[in-house]
Amino acid sequence: MDAADLADLFEPCGKVAVRRLFGGHGVYAGPVMVALESRGVVYLRVDALSRAAFAAEQSEPFVYERSGRKPMSLPYWRLPEAAFEDPDEMRRWFAMARDAAMRAASARRPSSRRRGDIDE
């Protein structure tokens, strides 16, 4: 799967950017990576709030082996099959992934408030 194929796949979801990533591709919605493609398989970002929905569809997490070490997983799970054929399903799954990516990005941002600041 190349960048053009990914852009076509996610077309129902609006504008995305596709960038090369570790031998595959990352799919971005604004500043956050929402999906990744590796070896022709597409995975969407998950978190504690969305993981159960992916598990219910018999989706599987993205797992890779890092330099002969034990397998590592990332918070991305396989795109459910229904999303490939139904634009409404694609939008639904993409929205869950985008929301998970935004929550993760928000959690990483340092607070602009300092300890001791008082709301007025």
Image (spheres, rainbow, N blue to C red):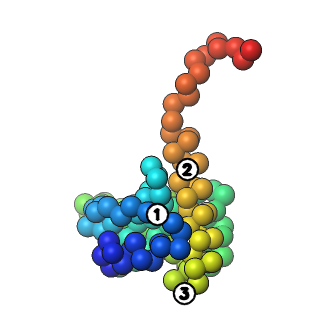
**Cα separation between marks 2 and 3:** 26 Å
**Residue at horizontal 45 percent and vertical 77 percent from the top:** 9
**Residue at horizontal 33 percent and vertical 79 percent from the top:** 1
Determine if residue 61 is in view: no
**Residue at horizontal 36 percent and vertical 78 percent from the top:** 5
Disc 3 designates what residue? 85
Callout 3–callout 1 Cβ contact below 8 Å: no
Under circle 3, the secondary element is helix
**Cα separation between marks 3 and 1:** 19 Å
Under circle 2, the secondary element is helix
Within-10-Å neighbours for mark 1: few <14, some 14–19, many 20+: few
Q: Position of residue 83 (x, y in %)?
A: 56, 80
Describe residue 1's horizontal placement relative to residue 47 as left or right.
left
Disc 1 designates what residue? 15
Q: Position of residue 39 (x, y in %)?
A: 32, 76
**Cα separation between marks 1 and 2:** 16 Å
Callout 2–callout 3 Cβ contact below 8 Å: no
Label ID, residue 90: none
The residue type indicated by label 1 comes to: Lys
**Residue at horizontal 58 percent and vertical 55 percent from the top:** 100
Disc 2 designates what residue? 102
Q: Position of residue 49 (x, y in %)?
A: 66, 58
